[in-house]
Amino acid sequence: MIKNKINKLQKTMEHEESKPTRLKYLKNKSQFIGWWIFLSIIVCILISLAQTLAREVTLDNVRAYDFKIIRAAIKHPKDVDGNYFQKIASELSTRDGSRVLFPLAIIDENSCSQNGKLISNNKICEHFKNIEQWDAKTKSENFNNYYKVRYKFYSEEVYMYAELDSRRILVGQAGNYLHLHGDDLAQIGEFITSRLPSYYLSSIYGITSIYHKSKWPMLIFFFSSTLALVISLSWIIRKEKQHADELILAKNLVAQKESQCKLLQFKIDESNNLLSDRKDKLESLQSQLKNNEIELGIYEHNRESLLNDLIELDHQHAILKLNLNDAEAEKHKLISKLELATSRINNAEAKNELQSYQSKYNRIVKLWDSSTKWSQRREIEESVSIQQRVPFTLSTGFIAFEAYVDDYYKDLARQNHPNEVATLNEKIDLVIRKRPDLRATLHDIRVARNRWFHNGKNPEKRIIDDLLSIVNGIEPRI
């Protein structure tokens, strides 16, 4: 309960804040911008890898068609000679033949003829000198139903093949993905575990080739992502500025309502003073009548006048209390709106608010520490209350004051043997025999103490100063 009240006090504190600038918002969004750019780069890399994989799979699939075209071009035995084969297959290699785009070879009983130069990347004839070696080294004959080609495995390579006649076969390197046709996950796995580390990430050429093969999708996405980031930041900044303005407005409304409550409380305190004054005068009249210091007629006249004043003051006091209750109810509604406005601001702003409230709360809880000095108690309560009232310190101070009087009284009572039951007034009368310099001060504090506990009347600043000076060395009873 106490902590809830403290939180409400914290949230009604008036702060002077300048309107946040766009630069401040951008600074608060540096982590968001960093993450956005980082994720955009990751997506760009994934796009480039996906583009590279799709290109490789497509090229491998095209090899099946190229293979069948070459086979059809040399399907007659009279056409199957080295020069004719080289002329047809030369289009599948670079101009100088040092690099072959689609390694092919014709293998017969005694020899092997391949496209491209001997120093090229075509190694088919190095592996298979003749058909006998082809049959001995290859294994796992398979058939691709979609492209209608047969293929076999050698080491980690896959080779398509077709018989040209009973003595000769056409062999083509199938690539990494033809044998996995239809299994997308297997193709992705092959690319990540084999092709990517062994070719693309093993050299600068491989890395740059990824960029050149997929630069346009990457650039289009990156610029689109940057544009989306700018639009998102503009929208977020606009919303946060709107929320910050709502927060400032909510704080101003709470501060205005606090001022109104403060004015009403001031009027109620004045009303309490007038009521207390009239009651004191009424008690004085009764005392004067009892001591025959005033005539009955004058007593009745003055008494009636005082009673009429009391009735009018009670009526005005009741109206002020109702107005204060209404104002406090409106204030709590505004505080709820303030809490909602606070919850909408960005994390950095909310963190600052929380740190500010936590700092004030940490100061307030010191009121319950016995080691906290009385001057510090007063300072703490005045700093968190817009009305600069110190109710906790006053109540604790008055209790300490009674302990101070009791300590003196008990010491003097053993010497003077007074009545065991004594009022605070009687105790003070005995105490001032030893401390006559404190006669007026102690009785002023006693009267203020009675008005505080009985009527909730806040003492004057002078009396509070005297009270805290007297109880300065006494441990608070908390």
Image (cartoon, rainbow, N blue to C red):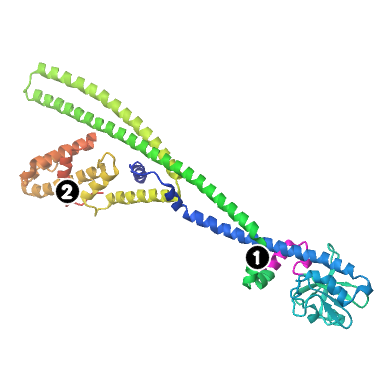
Image x and y of residue 198, in percent: 67, 73
Task: Name the residue rendered at 66%, 61% in the picture.
Answer: 214
What's the magenta region? Answer: 175-192
Task: Name the residue rendered at 18%, 42% in the picture.
Answer: 464
Tag 2: residue type? Val
Magenta part, dominant SS: helix
Q: CA distance from mark 1 to mark 2?
A: 82 Å
**Mark drawn on residue 286:** none
Which residue position holds label 2?
471
Image x and y of residue 81, in percent: 89, 76
Q: Is residue 120 visible?
A: yes
Q: Nearer the viewer, residue 95 or 26?
A: 95
- Helix, strand or loop status at disc 1: helix
Tag 1: residue type? Ile
462 sits to left or right of 248: left
Image x and y of residue 131, in percent: 87, 80
Q: Is residue 251 magenta?
A: no
Which residue position holds label 1?
210
Q: Nearer the viewer, residue 421 or 137?
A: 137
Report the mark closest to the observer, 1 or 2. Answer: 1
Image x and y of residue 259, in percent: 30, 35
Total tally of numbered discs in the picture: 2
121 sits to left or right of 403: right
Q: Nearer the viewer, residue 445 or 102?
A: 102
Task: Name the residue rendered at 63%, 73% in the picture.
Answer: 203
- Helix, strand or loop status at disc 2: loop
- Mark 1 nearby-residue class (10 Å; few <14, some 14–19, many ≥20): some
